[in-house]
Amino acid sequence: MTAPAGQFLAGKRIIVAGGSFAALSFILALEQLWDTSLERPKVILYERDDRDKSIGKDPYMLNINGASRNDGLIAIQQLGLLNEVRKHASLNGGDIRVWADNWKWLSSINPTAYGSLPAATMRVTRADLKRILVEKAETTTRTTLNWGSACTSAERLPSGEIRVTISDGATQDCDLLVAADGANSTMRACFRPNDMKTEYAGASQIGGISRLPGGVPKPIDKDYGLQMSSGEGVCCIYNPFDKETVAWAVSTVGPEREPKTDFTVAEFEDLKKEALETASMFQEPFKTVVEATMPDTAFIRPAKEKFAFQHDASLKGVMFIGDANHILSPFEFVGANLALKDGWDLAEQICSNTSMDAATASYDRVSISRFEPVFSFSHERIGFGHSTGKKWLFYKYGMAAQRGLKQVH
């Protein structure tokens, strides 16, 4: 069937590599936005992990933000899932609080909810959000979901189609390949082999997730927090998950460290000791939080990043979304937000343009302009959190002035 003008993928085949937030947002948005008077494209998704592992493999709490039209809650709202996500989430002001080593309040960012959204942030477990998206895809789309089956390679055929090899050795040809297979994207290695390197952002973290049966202590029990040393260049990020659980990460600048998540008993004890010695200036409850770390959650994590790229002529018929295209350092927790919007925006541009070239150009404008300020802000946060000398004094007095203005108002 020849695609009518404006629906160049009508009756065509789309393969989605990966079952990420970006991938699921894309297939849900495409189902919702497609002109029902036209033949639908055949959409096939391949995800390496089996269904249950894909949903439950990450214990982290996500902040899905809604302070601007570019935030993830807007995508959730557009997908018609706001009420369902809200059932499993807590509403949050999205505040980011900055504390001194002695827990004196230094500053805060207090966003407001955008438009009709119920809050500036919804806090939801990754597993709950993933399950909601998967169940929606299973019950409302015609996408074929292949769990435990990965796209292992891809190539362009002389016809212009993309041939994808699956982990069982079979091949599938498609008119559009949507690569949403994460930071170490296999599809990027096929089409952009010289673009696999991530850049070190200059700081490394050590940390984990702590469980405190008596409750997460104040003042880190509600909001995302950053504790700063008094000019020694050390900071600690806190992200409370629930009443008893909080993630923490002590950070310093310096040479890039090797990432690590699998620790022996002795190595785990050494990691906690290193955290306590590095941030010895931090007063309680810092020590209590570190001592309560669950061993299987401990990590050493260098801050790695990768700037978003545009889709040039060499990528015709292949679109990269989410972490397959861009990677943020762990100093900016909005990766899921970007992925959700990427998926929606790609589907929207496909359905509202008259060619794939036009849709690609429109998508790049939207996606990259959304990523750029977040990327820049992550660098500002690294510089701020590890400030020393005159820079620390500049921030110190600047935060004091901000507190004064807030007290006046």
Image: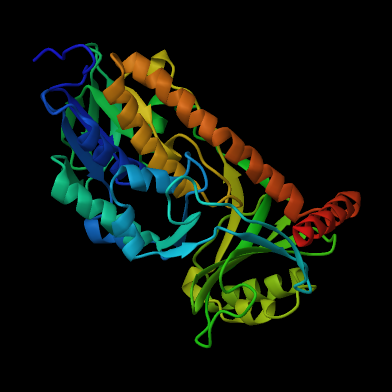
In the rendered structure, the answer to whether residue 321 lies left or right of residue 13 reads right
Q: Quadrant of residue 218?
A: bottom right
Which residue: 22% across, 40% down?
45
Give above or below for 290 relative to 171: below
Q: Quadrant of residue 361?
A: top left
Q: Residue at x 16, y 42 (%)?
A: 141
Q: Quadrant of the N terminus?
A: top left
Specify whether residue 217 is in view.
yes
Residue 95 placement, left or right of 32: right
In this orientation, does residue 18 appear? no
Q: Position of residue 268 (x, y in %)?
A: 57, 74
Residue 304, x across and y down, in percent: 58, 45
Residue drawn at 40 percent across, 13 percent down: 313
Q: Looking at the picture, how far across and down is residue 254, in whole percent?
A: 74, 52
In the displayed structure, 93 sits above or below 334; it is below
For the residue pair 96 and 275, the one nearer the viewer reads as 96
